[in-house]
Image: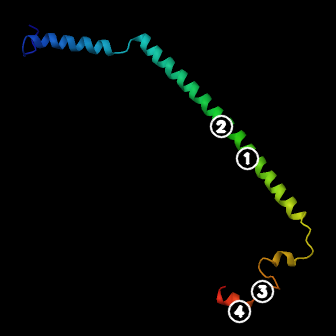
């Protein structure tokens, strides 16, 4: 009897519990392996972040080029319109042959 003050088999259960704890406790090689895996995954994660940042920079540069080409095409279109006068720009708002003030005020 081990003097636990409990049933005589409780000492055996205590010993089994201690053995189980010892088996679950990491040993030196497991600690090294855990540290190595942590370092490996951290390094891979950092490389992934760097790669993602490079890809995002390339996509942003590509979008910048597309936007610049759009503005270039829009400005080129505007300046190459062969318009006789500035009245051309008022035509959608005020077309003298078809304009009717009473129709505008009635909401037609």
Find disc 3 in the rendering and name its residue. Answer: 99
Q: CA distance from mark 4 to mark 1?
A: 49 Å
Neighbour tally class for label 2: few under 14, some 14-19, many 20 plus, Cα within 10 Å? few
Q: Of 103 and 77, which appears nearest the observer?
A: 103
Query: Cβ–Cβ below 8 Å for labels 2 and 4?
Result: no
Query: Cβ–Cβ below 8 Å for labels 3 and 2?
Result: no
Secondary structure, mark 1, is: helix
Find disc 4 in the rendering and name its residue. Answer: 102
Residue at 86% from the left image edge and 61% from the top image edge: 77
Neighbour tally class for label 3: few under 14, some 14-19, many 20 plus, Cα within 10 Å? few
Q: Quadrant of the C terminus?
A: bottom right
Q: Quadrant of the N terminus?
A: top left
State left or right for residue 16 relative to residue 73: left
Q: Of callouts 1 and 2, which one flags the residue occurring earlier in the amino acid sequence? A: 2
Neighbour tally class for label 4: few under 14, some 14-19, many 20 plus, Cα within 10 Å? few
Foreground mark, 3 or 1, reads 3
Foreground mark, 3 or 2, reads 3
Residue 81, horizontal then vertical, whole percent: 89, 66
Secondary structure, mark 4, is: helix
Q: CA distance from mark 2 to mark 4?
A: 61 Å
Find disc 2 in the rendering and name its residue. Answer: 53
Q: Of 2 and 108, which appears nearest the observer?
A: 108
Residue at 26% from the left image edge and 13% from the top image edge: 20
Q: CA distance from mark 1 to mark 2?
A: 15 Å
Residue at 65% from the left image edge and 32% from the top image edge: 51
Query: Cβ–Cβ below 8 Å for labels 1 and 2?
Result: no
Residue 4, horizontal then vertical, whole percent: 10, 14
Q: CA distance from mark 3 to mark 2?
A: 57 Å
Residue 87, horizontal then vertical, whole percent: 86, 79
């Amino acid at each position: 009897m081990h003097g636990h003050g409990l049933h005589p088999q409780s000492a055996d259960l205590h010993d089994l519990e201690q053995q189980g704890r010892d088996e679950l406790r990491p040993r030196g090689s497991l600690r090294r392996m855990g540290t190595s895996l942590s370092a490996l995954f951290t390094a891979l994660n950092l490389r992934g972040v760097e790669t993602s940042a490079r890809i995002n920079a390339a996509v942003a540069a590509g979008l910048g080029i597309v936007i610049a080409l759009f503005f270039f095409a829009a400005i080129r279109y505007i300046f190459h319109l062969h318009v006789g006068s500035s009245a051309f720009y008022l035509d959608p708002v005020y077309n003298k042959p078809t304009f009717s003030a009473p129709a505008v005020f009635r909401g037609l």
